[in-house]
Each structure stands twice: as C-alpha cells, then as structure tokens.
Image (cartoon, rainbow, N blue to C red):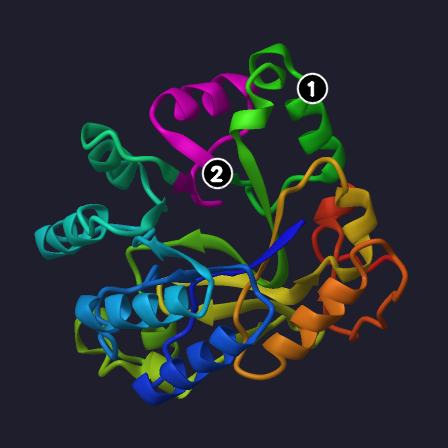
C-alpha cells in the first residue's frame, strides 16, 4: 500500500506552499500531486513554479503527478490545461473530461480524479480504454461498493492494469460552482474577490442553526464540514486499495501521514478528533464517526 498527498486545495502564500513541499520531500510519502485544482485566480505559483517543485520532489524519490483544474470557465484556463497535459515529463491527474480528451488525443496515460463521475464497471472500463492507469474513487462511495465493482466481469479481468486510490484524510471536496462562495461570504462579487481566499488557509466554516459545522467554503468549492479520516479503516483496504490519499492541511499533515503508515495493518489504532468522520467508507451518512 502506498501513500499520496493530494494537491493543496486551499489558497496558501507561495512560501507556505514551498515550505510544505520541502517537508514532503523529506517525508515518507510515495506520491505527490501538484497544481491548482480549484480556482484559476490563485496564482501564487505559476506553471513554471509547479514544474520546479515537481523536479525537486522527483529528485527526492517521489512520484509526481500534475493535477488539473476541476471546473474550466474560460479559454485562458483551457490554454493552461494544455500546458499541464503537454508537460512531457509527469503523469497528469485529470479532474474533468476536457483533460481526459486532451490526454487521450496525445495517447498519454492519466489518473482519473475523484471529481470524474465514475460509478460503474462500464464507465471504469471505458476510461481504461481511453488511457486511465489510476482511478481515484469518488469520495462518497463505500468499501462494499468498491469491492463489488472490482469483482464485476468488465473490471476483474483488467484489475492488474489499474491502480485504485482512495481519498482518506481531509475535508472532502463535494461540489464546485460557477459562483465563489468565499467571496460572497464577504459580500464581494466574484470578479472583485480580491483573492480573499488567502485569508482562509483552511477554508471558511459554515455552521447549521444548531451550531454544527456542516460545510467548509473554499472559493467555488464546497467541502464537507467534518474531516474525513480513515486511519483506522486501513486494514479493511487491504487487497482493494493500492494508494491512500491524504489531503494537505495547514498543520499536522505529516504527523498524520506517519500515523497512517504505522497503522496499515491495524497495529496502532489512532484516536480520532471530534470533528473527524468515516461514515461514507462504512456505507453510512458521511458525517458519522465510527470506532
């Protein structure tokens, strides 16, 4: 079982991002995803900067994957997407079907991100014929669902050609919109947002009238209010999951990475925090926390 760091979902200052990836280079993580996946206005690091970080991580022995935007809204974003798909060195995580088409046209293998709607054996097999070599399961699906899918005839006979990756730590990305909810929360128009996301390095929480945190606003992205944490479910992934993904947090990411690595076979179960959840993996409501 390998461990990966997903692309940073939040808007962090350039130096914070570079410091984070210096820590990643010295960590025991196997795979690192790089790039802006949420909002094209977030330009603390440009494409050339991401490539520089990618080279440094590769020299440190990490597999590097470049992640594309999830929602494309302008021709300029399509031009940027082409840079990622034509990088010539690194595997690409396609987070929308436009990226898949570009990669297929160039006969390049790709990772299908969790935002790609893949819920059955027919879609999974079709994506593989288009060049998919790794699949990140949609965050709301369960272990039982995954097990049944991998046993389906159209998948079972090509399972050895496919890596399965599961989002296992962090606030889950649930939806994307043409509107910027963070800007709206400050009574700003999207076009005059003044990049206010940078003030919320862990997103902006949304509470219910009862005081329960139900969502996190992250620009045009809406995340789960609870932090998904499958550290104690790792034994149930054996034989099903090839890669366990942790989503970068401002603090504590690498200490949690070590906790995950130490508990691969259940020898060192970890205490969850009150806002952690694991319901989806157990085929329960997403905000549920089980033992």
Q: Nearer the viewer, residue 279 or 17?
A: 17
198 sits to left or right of 143:
left
Does the image show residue 212? no
Magenta region includes residue 126: yes
Numbered mark located on residue 134 in the image: 2
Quadrant of the snapshot with the C terminus: bottom right
Q: Which residue is drawn at 32% across and 72% down?
A: 53
Does the image show residue 193? yes
Indicate the quadrant where residue 33 lies.
Answer: bottom left
Identify whether 153 is placed above or below 89.
above
Residue 31 position in % (x across, y down): 50, 58
Instruction: Report helix, strand or loop for mark 1.
Output: loop
234 sits to left or right of 54:
right
Residue 26 position in % (x across, y down): 53, 78
Magenta region includes residue 263: no
Instruction: Report helix, strand or loop for mark 2.
Output: strand
Mark 1 in CB contact with mark 2 (< 8 angstroms):
no
Bounds of the magenta span? 111-134
Numbered mark located on residue 93 in the image: none
The residue pinned by badge 1 equals 151
């Amino acid at each position: 079982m390998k461990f990966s760091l997903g692309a940073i979902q939040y808007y962090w200052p350039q130096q914070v991002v570079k410091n984070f990836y210096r820590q990643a280079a010295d960590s025991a993580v196997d795979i690192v995803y790089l790039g802006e996946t949420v909002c094209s206005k977030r330009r603390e690091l440009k494409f050339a900067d991401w490539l520089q970080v990618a080279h440094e991580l590769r020299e440190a022995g990490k597999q590097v994957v470049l992640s594309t935007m999830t929602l494309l809204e302008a021709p300029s974003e399509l031009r940027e997407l082409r840079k990622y798909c034509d990088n010539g060195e690194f595997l690409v995580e396609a987070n929308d079907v436009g990226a898949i088409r570009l990669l297929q046209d160039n006969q390049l293998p790709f990772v299908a991100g969790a935002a790609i709607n893949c819920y059955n054996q027919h879609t999974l097999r079709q994506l593989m014929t288009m060049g998919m070599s790794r699949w990140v399961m949609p965050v709301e699906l369960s272990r039982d669902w995954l097990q049944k899918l991998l046993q389906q005839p159209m998948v079972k006979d090509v399972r050895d050609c496919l890596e399965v990756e599961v989002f296992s730590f962090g606030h889950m990305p649930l939806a994307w919109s043409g509107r910027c909810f963070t800007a709206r929360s400050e009574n700003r128009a999207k076009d005059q947002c003044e990049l206010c996301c940078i003030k919320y390095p862990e997103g902006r929480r949304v509470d219910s009238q009862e005081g329960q945190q139900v969502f996190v606003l992250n620009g045009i992205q809406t995340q789960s209010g609870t932090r998904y944490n499958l550290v104690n479910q790792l034994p149930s992934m054996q034989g099903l999951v090839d890669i366990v993904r942790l989503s970068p947090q401002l603090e504590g990411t690498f200490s949690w990475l070590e906790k995950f690595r130490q508990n691969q076979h259940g020898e060192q179960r970890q205490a969850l925090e009150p806002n952690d959840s694991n319901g989806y993996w157990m085929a329960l409501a997403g905000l549920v926390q089980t033992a």
